[in-house]
Image (cartoon, grey):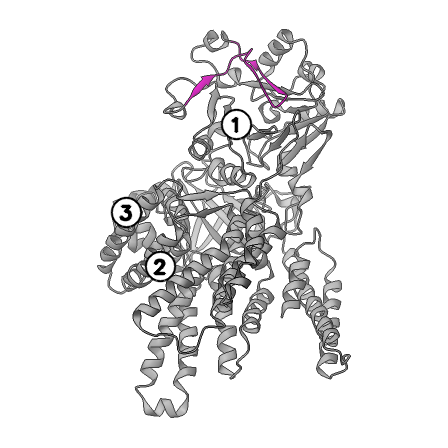
Amino acid sequence: MAGSVLGAALQLQQAALWPWLVYACLLAAACGAWLCLRARWAPPALWLHLTLALCVGAMAGSGLAGWRATAYAANALSPALEGRDLLLVGRVASMPQHGAGGSRFAFEVESAHWADAGAADPDPPRVPSRVSLAWYAQGGGLWARAAAEAPPSAAGRTAPVHAGERWRMVVRLRAPHGSLNPHGFDHELRMWEQGEHASGQVRNGARDPPPERLGSGWRHPVERLRETVRDAVFEQIEEPRRAGVIAALVTGDQRAIERSDWDIFRATGVAHLMSISGLHITMFAWLAALAVGALWRCSARLMLRWPAQHAAIVGGLLLATLYALFSGWGLPSQRTVLMLGAIGLLRLTGRRWPWPFVWLSACAVVVAVDPWALMQAGFWLSFVAVGVLFAAEGAAPAGAPTGIGARLLRLLREQWIVTLALTPLTLLLFQQVSAVGLLANAIAIPWVTLVVTPLAMLGVVVPSLWHLAAGSVQALLAVLEWLAGLPFATLSMPAPPLWMAAAGVAGGVLLAMRLPWTLRALGLPLLLPALLWQAPRPAAGEFDLLAADIGQGSALLVRTATHSLLYDAGPRYSLESDAGQRVLVPLLRALGERLDTVLLSHRDSDHTGGAAAVLAAQPQATLLSSIEDGHPLKSGRAARRCEAGQRWTWDGVDFEVLHPQAGDYTAFVPPKPNSISCVLRIGNGRTAALLAGDIERLQEMALVARRSELRADVLLVPHHGSRTSSSALLLDAVRPRIALVQAGWRNRFGHPAEEVVGRYRERGIALVESSRCGAATWSSSDPGSVKCQRHEGRRYWNHVPP
């Protein structure tokens, strides 16, 4: 069991897959060795026998995971198809997820053709069988009619496409490509695990052939029912905030919950309650088992045919599986059902294994079916929590009190145990813990489990009960808002190294176990290093740059020995999401950064889209920018206008603003944002970096004319590599070794332009693109090299741009 998990974990570290035959041989060899062990051909020494068993399990786990991975990889999208118009016929395979101005859904492809009937290649394109599509509200059409026919309560949530429908539509596909940052979310792994090997956009512009609905059918009935129930919730509950929570609890649509509410749930440590998680499935299985067992005992004939305990286990598992299916059959739900099934099977077969074997067996079953679960935070939080509870209760004293008071004390103790043991793991995964989480969960767990969720589920049959559920949600939100508003409601710490976090979890488990305090105290030396860890910083007189991978936009972190500056804050992706909330705030938290200054080069949204989230998380930071007075970002905080000549020194490193001049703000009214981009030069006397914002040729000429010394080792390429920037005059004046381009993969602007790339190559300048590099790290102590997150931490599911 442990060996199979270890083998799968080792296989997941591969940067590239081996041929499928290698994995098949590993699996076959493991099966043969297992038969030998079963036939007692192994050495008699117990330690050697266990070592061989571990190796055999590791071979089996690695072979099975690798063999499945090669099968997945065979269904990948060909690079030749990226960006081309394709005519797809297929069926909507999931409940559409609504957002501002569009929807996203899974699409099962039945056939694919070239959209251009006169395409040179006569062979039909080969596309993955399941893709993720986005349909945006471009130019009205079906979107406009659907919105006009929708009731007022569903405004903004209505799409012309519904689960189970069959469509013919023109789309553009691309390989899954997400941002890769230190300690960041791996979107490519998520799509890989869901079996979606391409994402794309429905073409519905004025010049595109309109998508055509071909009919409905009997397929995907559960998804159709989920969509119907979700829409009914929003029709019944006019207040979208409460309706979103109810829809998430009933149908698993987590995007229905507003972003501000997610912030509250995370701050109070109850986010796991607001989605169909392992806790909900387990609780539902427990209640269903109690109900089935009670009903079974009412019939003497049934009792004689099958024991009530066994009927309760099977009935509870079946009903929990149906609940998981209705809630969307998400990955956490699948893992929980597999775990419950493994434990139930052990009970049905009469096995009474020690708790570590039961725990490892459930873990091995989940990993065998979904090896990529080992890379997911939810998997580790769930299984470590179960293991901690097993360990803490494994030696419970006989004859313990069984009254209501004793049960409440036991529940509080279990919650405290899990909180203590999971704190280091939570810091490793999320870099923050909720200081009010113990109290918030003590209130929210029974309220959500026993009041909100039952009312929400019963509302499917009696819709009027959704109003009671909405009232209970409102009461809970009021309490959680108050808790989240308390000082120090959350504690943020840098992400500790993996070995330190593992030691911290072990220390938490040791402190939680029923052992003498002299032994429990040994957990403190293991726990404290993870809590006191501080991320390393540059030495005095040195500085480093981290160009975050944020798509089409700019965001670059500058660090000295004791100070930090963020140059730009990335784009806004939608009304619900931006680079600050998704990338920069988690990144800064993981690195333990406390910003001194946020410098926004200019007001364009691809540079300021994430600024509000960053400034809210870093209230002590001073704002330096070229944005106009009265801008919302300047309200309620210290702010200065950047002007050429401003200088300061941090830890022996000089910072100087080179552009714009004071007169540039009044040269044109209103000034063009790009023309007043703040240009910052950073140097320590040996090396230098030039951050050029979105200046264009005219500003580059003025900069070269005003400044005699522009030499820098690294250059943040102006305007993301636009044709209007990176003039030969500027490149000859700066003469950088390395040029960083922050631009989105296959962005609609074509950045960096080919002619610009050619100018850099002619001068022997290494061009590092964030879309190919991921987050790029450069240090003044090693000015000739750049570390790329996409190369350093590459895994075989990560997209490799051609």
Q: Is residue 196 visible?
A: no
- Disc 1 from disc 2: Cα separation: 40 Å
Q: Quadrant of the C terminus?
A: top right
Element assignment for label 2: helix
The image quadrant that residue 636 belongs to is top left
Along the polypeptide, which appears first: circle 1 or circle 2? Answer: 2
The residue that disc 1 covers is 568
Instruction: Specify the label residue 445 is tagged with.
Output: 2
Element assignment for label 3: helix
* Magenta-span inclusion, residue 641: yes
1 or 2: mark nearer the eye:
2
**Which residue range is magenta in the image?**
638-661
Q: Crowdedness of circle 3 by 10 Å Cα count: few (<14), some, many (20+)? A: few
The residue that disc 3 covers is 478
Q: Residue at x 27, y 65 (%)?
A: 461
Residue 362 locus on image (x, y percent): 54, 70
